[in-house]
């Protein structure tokens, strides 16, 4: 362990970014499994242990990263305090994505099974899009490509508005509650995940003060 | 600045530091014997020497600087090893003021402050206990200086002889140039000596400041990586070794111990994990006095450097292995932090009394 002092390797915020990326990969894993339980009729018990263990790992990673950020500030001083605070927000958002994935699993635990629904392919397609976005967000955390980040942010905004419309449709729907309510809740969790994904990517490119806001800080996009 | 350029700068600064030590030694030698005697008469009492060591170190906020100056004085022959040993011990106590001051930064957040203050003062209590045990033992038996003298004799020769240090040869030239420069300005004897000593001290302080600053930049990522690797898994001898390595790298125990204080305040590491790092820092910081001794011409200078190392290693050997003894500084620090968090004036009063009032009174009484 002491030899790590003499070994060459990344240090500082690069290491923290790498840990955040693996945290995001865990969040994606939880999300995919939880959605499988709701949309593909996967056995709840078969995925529940994995999702909860992954969530535990995400929570532990968040705590470890907070510690590493404090160590970073203690060693380097306040030179990159903006980035450090940005990472504090970022890891919290990833941790919340893990929680939201767990909430989707809770739907399955309550008996929600949309695998036989008429719109299941459409729902699976949205899930696939969100899952791919999680992968792309992980890539963007590593390479800080401003143009790609902007495009990513636009696509998360579009999907978020789409999910808001779907939630609104559910609220105004005349269909029975047992059909509409699970969908509204699922869309709500997806919307939260997508909003957090957009914010995760922009922590690397936007000023700290307006991260997670639109219109120069006027509108809060996270919920 | 690119890393290789910074590394070259650090090597140059170490050379400048050694020139400063050499200048200090030469400056004292230029002064008359009477002046030398008058100058160091006050520290012939070991308790006064101890307090001078504390005050000097508090003043420059660096035990590396104060011990290097002590080594320079011993190298000049004006200060004996016996008188230097208590000063070295005092320097060990004085250096703890820096992280205690850092802990006061979180005085408004009570729980953070409690943890930070305890983490900082555990260093104070350990060093106080070490001096309380080892100073009387040294005064009665002289074993620290005897042991250091034996090692020094094995390495460079017996006390009273001239040690042909290879580093000394490289340092001699610029010291001579500066001496000639001052002589050409019409300075002589005591005035010349005083100016040389002041220049030497300024060079030592500035060089150490810049060495520390640049080394911190050079090794910051390594320090961060190893702290994450070690502190997450607990304390013990590994953390102690890390304290030694970081302190040798940055040439400052204050940097190492001060890094730990915000970590304690944030609750990232416990006082039990910080404690061994602090003790490692005590040992690591002794490298500077040993380095300074390389620029000296008397084996006694190296003896003093070795005393500094032996003192800190012995303190760990006495106070760390047994859990009951090891816990004493921790409990004292936590007790003081518990009081300080409810009465913040106690924390400030502690710093003022411990590091200024008592040493000043001690020097006044015992000199």
Image: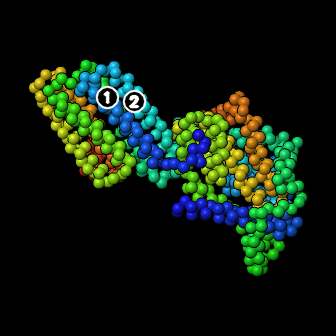
Q: Position of residue A124 (x, y in %)?
A: 22, 32
Query: Foreground: B328 or B365?
Result: B328
Tell me if residue B177 comes above or below residue B366 in the rendering: below
Q: Position of residue A86 (x, y in %)?
A: 39, 46
- On the image, which quarter does residue B244 sit in? top right
Sequence-first tag of 1 and 2:
1
Q: Is residue B205 left or right of residue A104?
A: right
Number of numbered discs overlaid on the protein picture? 2
Q: Residue at x 77, y 44 (%)?
A: B311
Query: Foreground: A122 or B296?
Result: A122
Q: Chain of mark 1?
A: A
Q: Which residue is mark 2?
A: A54
Q: Position of residue B29 (x, y in %)?
A: 83, 67
Q: Position of residue A121 (x, y in %)?
A: 18, 31
Labelled disc at residue A33: 1
Secondary structure state at the residue bearing disc 1: helix
Query: Foreground: B109 or A79?
Result: A79
Q: Residue at x 75, y 79 (%)?
A: B185
Q: Is residue B125 left or right of residue A202?
A: right
The image's colour scheme reads rainbow
Q: Chain of mark 2?
A: A
- On the image, which quarter does residue B317 sit in? top right
Check whether the beta carbons of the residues at disc 1 and disc 2 lie within 8 A of each other. Answer: yes
| Structural crowding at the residue carrying mark 1, measured as other residues with C-alpha within 10 Å and reported as few (<14), some (14–19) or many (≥20) | many
Tell me if residue A40 comes above or below residue A14 in the rendering: above
Query: Foreground: A208 or B188?
Result: A208
Q: Is residue A37 left or right of residue B17?
A: left
Labelled disc at residue A127: none
Q: Residue at x 76, y 49 (%)?
A: B308
Do we see residue B357 in this rendering? no
| Structural crowding at the residue carrying mark 2, measured as other residues with C-alpha within 10 Å and reported as few (<14), some (14–19) or many (≥20) | many
């Amino acid at each position: 362990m002491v030899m790590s002092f003499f070994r060459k390797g990344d240090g500082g915020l690069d290491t923290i970014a790498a840990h955040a990326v693996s945290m995001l990969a865990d969040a994606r894993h939880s999300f995919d499994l939880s959605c499988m339980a709701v949309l593909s009729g996967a056995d709840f018990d078969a995925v529940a242990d994995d999702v909860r263990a992954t969530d535990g790992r995400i929570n532990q990673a968040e705590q470890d990263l907070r510690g590493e950020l404090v160590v970073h500030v203690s060693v380097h001083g306040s030179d990159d305090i903006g980035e450090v605070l940005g990472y504090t927000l970022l890891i919290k958002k990833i941790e919340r994505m893990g929680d939201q994935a767990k909430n989707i699993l809770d739907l399955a635990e309550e008996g929600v099974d949309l695998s036989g629904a008429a719109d299941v392919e459409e729902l699976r397609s949205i899930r696939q899009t969100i899952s791919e976005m999680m992968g792309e967000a992980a890539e963007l955390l590593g390479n800080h490509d401003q143009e790609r980040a902007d495009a990513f942010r636009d696509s998360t905004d579009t999907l978020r508005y789409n999910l808001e419309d779907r939630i609104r449709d559910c609220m105004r729907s005349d269909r029975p509650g047992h059909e509409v309510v699970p969908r509204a809740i699922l869309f709500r969790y997806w919307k939260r995940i997508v909003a957090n994904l957009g914010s995760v990517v922009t922590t690397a490119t936007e000023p700290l003060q307006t991260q997670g806001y639109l219109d120069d800080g006027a509108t809060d996009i996270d919920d | 600045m690119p890393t290789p350029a910074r590394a070259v700068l650090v090597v140059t600064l170490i050379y400048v530091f050694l020139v400063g030590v050499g200048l200090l030694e030469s400056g004292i030698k230029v002064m008359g014997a009477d002046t030398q005697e008058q100058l160091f008469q006050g520290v012939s009492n070991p308790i006064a020497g101890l307090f001078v060591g504390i005050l000097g170190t508090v003043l420059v906020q660096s035990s590396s600087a104060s011990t290097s100056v002590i080594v320079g004085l011993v190298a000049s022959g004006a200060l004996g090893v016996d008188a230097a040993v208590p000063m070295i011990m005092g320097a060990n106590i004085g250096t703890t003021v820096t992280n205690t001051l850092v802990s006061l930064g979180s005085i408004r957040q009570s729980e953070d402050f409690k943890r930070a203050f305890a983490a900082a003062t555990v260093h104070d209590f350990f060093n106080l206990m070490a001096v309380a045990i080892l100073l009387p033992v040294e005064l009665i038996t002289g074993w620290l200086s005897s042991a250091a003298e034996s090692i020094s004799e094995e390495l460079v020769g017996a006390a009273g002889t001239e040690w042909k240090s290879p580093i000394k040869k490289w340092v001699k030239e610029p010291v001579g140039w500066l001496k000639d420069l001052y002589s050409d300005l019409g300075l002589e004897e005591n005035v010349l000596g005083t100016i040389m000593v002041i220049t030497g001290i300024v060079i030592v302080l500035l060089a150490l400041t810049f060495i520390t600053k640049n080394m911190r930049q050079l090794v910051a990522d390594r320090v961060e990586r190893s702290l994450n690797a070690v502190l997450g898994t607990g304390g013990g001898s590994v953390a102690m070794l890390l304290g030694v390595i970081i302190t040798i790298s940055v040439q400052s125990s204050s940097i190492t111990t001060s890094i730990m204080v915000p970590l304690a305040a944030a609750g990232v590491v416990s006082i039990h994990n910080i404690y061994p790092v602090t003790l490692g820092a005590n040992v690591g910081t002794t490298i500077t006095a040993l380095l300074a001794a390389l620029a000296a011409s008397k084996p006694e200078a190296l003896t003093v450097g070795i005393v500094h190392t032996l003192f800190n290693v012995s303190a760990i050997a006495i106070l760390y292995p047994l859990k009951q003894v090891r816990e004493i500084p921790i409990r004292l620090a936590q007790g003081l932090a518990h009081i300080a968090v409810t009465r913040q004036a106690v924390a400030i009063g502690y710093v003022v009394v411990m590091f200024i009032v008592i040493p000043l009174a001690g020097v006044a009484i015992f000199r």
